[in-house]
Image (tube, coloured by chain):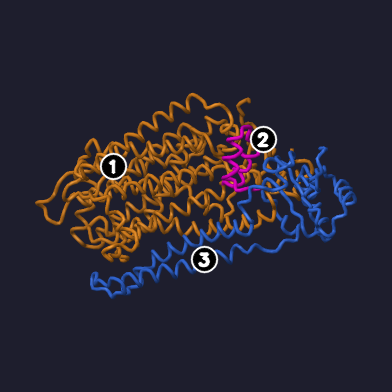
Amino acid sequence: MTAHPVRLIGVLAEFETTHGLFSACEKVRDAGFANWDAHSPFPVHGLEKAMGLSRSKVGWVTLVCGLSGAAGGMVLQWWASAVAQPLVIAGKPFFSWPAFVPITFEIGVLFGALGAVFGMLHFNRLPRFHHPLFAVHAFERVTDDRFFISIDADDPKFRGEETVKWLVDMGATIHRVEEAA
Amino acid sequence: MERYVPENTEAYDPIDGRHPLILGEQSFSAVTEAVCRPTETRTPKAWWVLFAVSITMLAWFGVAIGYLFWEGVGIWGLMIPVGWAWDITNFVFWVGIGHAGTLISAILFLFRQKWRTSINRFAEAMTIFAVMCALTFPGIHVGRVWLAYYLFPIPNQMSVWPNFRSPLLWDVFAVSIYGTVSLLFWYTGLIPDLATLRDRAKHRAGKVLYGVVALGWRGSNRHWLNYEKAYLLLAGLSTPLVLSVHSIVSFDFAVSVLPGWHTTIFPPYFVAGAIFSGFAMVITLMVIARWAFNLEHIVTIRHFENMAKIILVTGMMVGYAYGMEFFISWYSGNPYEQFAFVNRAFGPYAWAYWTMISCNVLSPQIFWFKKARTSIPILFVMSIFVNIGMWFERFVIIVTSLHRDFLPSSWDYFSPTFWDISCLVGSFGLFFTMFCLFVRFLPIVAMAEVKTVLPGANPHGAHAHGGGR
């Protein structure tokens, strides 16, 4: 403990196994916490159900981006070949759309992929280089072999020491997430 | 650390009855340790040697390209009628090499082939570097390179637009978009592992650099949910993309009316050949990297055996295509088509044709034997053969079709010049330089993904109670 005044941001419960994390998540979910998260070095199968998360919206972003990319690609080719610079090539009509399918498809894939990646980053609020959790030394192992649950102190269900004891009873090691007040 | 000697290859998981994908000590931190060590220890001398050789070749590539820009494509052996030769051979060769990377990362992912996790990162990196090499060649082979921007649909002072009906333009879009999407896919896969390197970094420079590229990843499962969805979608988008790219490359030829090129089997045949050569390149590089970095327990003999099976299958697909080309040229009754193929096998380039057949069709047949599929020396030699054979396949298709023009007085024989050879060797310099940097500074195995196939990863599995450590 430091001499400086600190403010409690939340608590971090460390687990050694995926099983411990999974059952603890179910309990935290059932207790009705809202501002909490689970952290693991890899996606744990089925944990989204144990956490009560709804489906990811990234798919919709990808679909919309991909379709608009494809439509934009077709419009670009129509405009360039039939409006901006109409040229008769091999006696084909200006808007000979079957020849435009390959590029339409490719641009659709490009926009869909950009939508998937940037949509994912948007929903995850990444990049975010500063986070109170990074101040906890033990949290470095989240990308190695440890599993964590973080509960924010501003959660309506958070009861300070009572919550800490509850987590300890689940077999967790507790770390305090603090920042200078 | 002791070199791992595989002995429990017959062990199997009591839950699903399958052999484990990762051998040796099966803990999460052991995977992190094995994969991160090459990036954290002192640079080995052998790396400096390889890097020096590669970067010298790359510098020579720069010289060759500079001279080409100064003097023009006449420094190559190109002439009329052979207006395309090594430049386009190298291009198609490198695009093909890239395909195994996307196949392993996307198609095998969609098919839930968990064995891919040990090799996908490596193969994806190979894809990106191969596409970089590939993109160089169409870029430099257009006579007036300073007008290469005509290829892109950008408004210019003459209001000239590209001809969107041309397969050559489809190619520009297909290959550059393939490169971009592969890069996105690779980087997305890297984010969690870059966070591992950040958390393990001892020095401030490493913490900052890896920290910036890891984008502040903290393993949140709210993030993993979106991340896995995005990864699945990228795999789903890359799968038709990879099949389309080499099909479009084949349209560069197939859509023409030249005997020897005007062949409807080209799209699937090019895709099969690309996968064939790509897997061979993965084996070539993986044999070296796995030995150099002690990854024998993560990239096991089973991984090699699976890749050898894919090489056997795709090798027979290209063999079928070679046969079918002859059959169709005979069956079509077109004498020019028939001449082109007889000339291909028995004309002045017969040596190249039979090199291709021996390397691509005959040599992979050895993989019918399990002993060959599980022997590292045989795998390594075969993979080199396949790479040589596939380079010759593109050479045979391009040059044998061109050197006999419709007008017999223009018939000629193509010979490479010193600068043709410099460009091919130089492109390998680019490829290996990128690879040296990759193995030194980035995790060459997808750690987060490998951890998901370990027994402790399943919260309901038999090992879950205490399997984490």
Q: Which mark is residue A65?
A: 3
Residue A172 in the image: state x and y as whole percent.
Answer: 83, 44
| Front residue of this view, candidates B142 and B157 | B157
Query: Mark 3 to mark 2: distance in Å?
Result: 40 Å
Q: Is residue B260 left or right of residue A12?
A: left
Chain to which mark 1 belongs: B
Residue that mark 2 sits on: B30
Q: Are marks 1 and 3 in contact (CB under 8 Å)?
A: no
Chain to which mark 3 belongs: A
Question: At label 1, which amino acid type do we have?
Answer: Trp
Task: Give the image quarter of residue B365.
Answer: top left
Residue that mark 1 sits on: B354
Question: At label 3, which amino acid type do we have?
Answer: Cys
Question: At label 2, which amino acid type do we have?
Answer: Ala
| Front residue of this view, candidates B440 and A151 | A151
Chain B's colour is orange
Chain to which mark 2 belongs: B
Q: Which residues are magenta?
A: B190-217
Chain A's colour is blue
Q: Are marks 3 and 2 in contact (CB under 8 Å)?
A: no
Residue A128 in the image: state x and y as whole percent.
Answer: 63, 51
Residue at disc 1, secondary structure: helix
